Image (tube, rainbow, N blue to C red):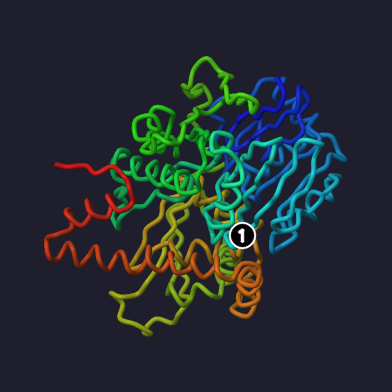
Amino acid sequence: MGLRFETLGNASVMVFDEDHPVLATDPWFVGTCYFGSWALDHALTPEQIENFRNADYLWISHGHPDHLHDESLALLPRGKRVLLPDHYCDEIATHLKQLGFDVTVLPYRSWFRLSPRVRVLCVDNVNQDAILAIEADGSLILNLNDSPLCGEFHFLHRLVRAYPRQNTYLLALCSVDADMFNFVDAAGHSLVGPPEERKPGAIWGVARTADRLGVGNFCCSSSQHIYVRADSIWANPYRIGWRDMQRHWSRPDVRLVEPFVTVDLDDGSITRNHPSQESDTSQISPTTGDDDWQATLSAEEWTRVEAFIRRFEMVRAYVDFVEFTVGDEIRRFDLNPAGTRPEHRRRGVAFIVPRQSLLTTVEYGYLDDLLIGNFMRVRLINTALYPRFTPLVAKVGGNAKVHTQTQYRRFLARYFLRNPLGMSRYYLEAAMNYRVIPLFRRAAEDFGIKRPLKYLYRTMLGDPVRHG
C-alpha cells in the first residue's frame, strides 16, 4: 500500500506512508477512562500499539481522557513529537512538556508538513475542541473527532472543494451518549426515554453535515467505546453502532464507511481490521470502579466542593443553586440568595454522585469527566445544561480556565478576532436552536400543528420524514 489511514480505538486515527506510521491521533489504546466508565469497544493489537510508539508525530485534539489518556501516554517514548491545537489555555502543552514530550503548538489554519506527501492543518475553536485537516497526496481527511462546528463550516467547505469528492473523508462523532444524558426527575426516575427515539436524529444530523461539507465519504469514528462500570452499563443500548448507522444513514451521495478499517487513499478500497463489529462485552465489571455510593464527605471535603462550584461565577446568571447528594447527605449551595425569585421559579442543578469521583473532579477541575461517564445522575430544576451551564463550567471554566466575566470577554474576543463572521453565524445558529426553535415548538404544540410542521422542517433539512 501507498498512503492509507486506519481508524482504531475510540477516536484514534493512524496515517501511513507506505508501511511507516507518519501520524497518530488522540492516544487511548489501553485501559479505561471517565473513572472506569468507558472501555475500548475493540482492543488494539500489539502491532497497532507499536505503531503508536513508532509514529513520527502524535496529534492530540483536546483534554478529554479518551483523547489525552495518561495510561496510554506512559507507554510512549519520551521525546516523541506531539502536535497540539493552539488552545486558549496552555495547560496540556505544559503537562506534556513536563512528561518529556517534544511539543509543537500548531498555528491556527496554517499547514504544517509532516512528510513529503503528508501535511496537516489545525483549527481550534471556542468549544475547546479542535479539527485536523490531513492532506495526503491529493486526498483530504477532515478529522472532527468530538468537535462541533463553531463557525468553521464555510472554511472547511472551501477546503473540501479543492479535492475530488471521492478523495475526501470526514471522521466525526456520531453519538447520543458522549455527554450527560442520565437525567432523573424529583423521585429519581429516569427521563432518558427509549434509545430509538434518540438515534435516528443524531445520525441524520451527522449525515447532513457530511453532505453539506461536500465530502464523498464518512468514516465512523470518535464514538467507539463501551460502558463497563456496573452503574453505567445501562447506557450501552444508547450507543450508536454500525448497524444503527447502516439503518439510518440518510445521504446516499456520501459513502458510509464502517469503524475499525484501513482505507487505501490510492484507490479508496477498505480493509476490515476485525472480523466482527460486536463490542467486547467481556470488559464489563460488576463493580463501580473506585467509588462506593454509600460513602459520605467530611466537613472539610464539603468545603472543597463548595469552593469548586463557586469558582464558576458566570453561571449565577443562569442557575440559582447547585445541589449535591453524596451517600445519604444532601447539600445545596445558593449561588444567588434565596428570595431573589419565587421558590417555585428558582433554577438549579442537582447532582447525585459518588464521593471519590466527585473529589477527583474537584481536585483537577474537570466537571466534564463526571458528566460524560454517565454514572452520575442529574436533576434539572427550571433550567438546562445547555447552552450555558455545561459550556461555562466544563468547557470555558474547566478547560480554558476562564471563570469571571472579565476573563470571559477576553476569551470571546480571541475567537471573534480570528473568525468574526464564522463566530457570528455560530452564535446566531445557537440562538435559533436554543431559543427560537423551542418557542416555535411550544407554539406548534399549543395549536396542535406540531406534526405537520415537523414534517415540513425535516423536508427542508433533507432528512427522512416519518409518517404515522
Residue at 54% x, 38% y: name it.
165
The amino acid at mark 1 is Asn
Asked whether 147 or 143 is in front, the reply is 143
- Where is residue 394? Give x, y as percent: 56, 60
Instruction: Relative to 327, say whether 171 is above or below.
Output: above
The residue depicted at 74 percent of the width and 36 percent of the height is: 23
Q: What residue does disc 1 label?
A: 125
**Residue 195 left/right relative to 29:** left
Viewer-nearest residue: 241 or 307: 241
* Residue in the image at 30% along x and 50% along y: 191
Q: Position of residue 439 (x, y in %)?
A: 27, 68
Q: Is residue 170 above or below residue 314?
A: above
In the picture as drawn, the residue positioned furthest to the left comes out as: 448
Answer with left or right where residue 162 lies relative to residue 183: right
Q: Quadrant of the C terminus?
A: top left
Q: Secondary structure at mark 1?
A: loop
Q: Position of residue 228 (x, y in %)?
A: 50, 32
Closer to the camera in the image, 301 or 352: 352
Q: Position of residue 139 (x, y in %)?
A: 64, 36
Count up the numbered dots.
1
Q: Residues within 10 Å of mark 1 (few under 14, many from 20)?
A: many
Query: Who's the residue at 46% across and 45% down the image?
Result: 374
Check the image and name the residue furthest to the top. 275
Position of the N terminus, as image quadrant, is: top right
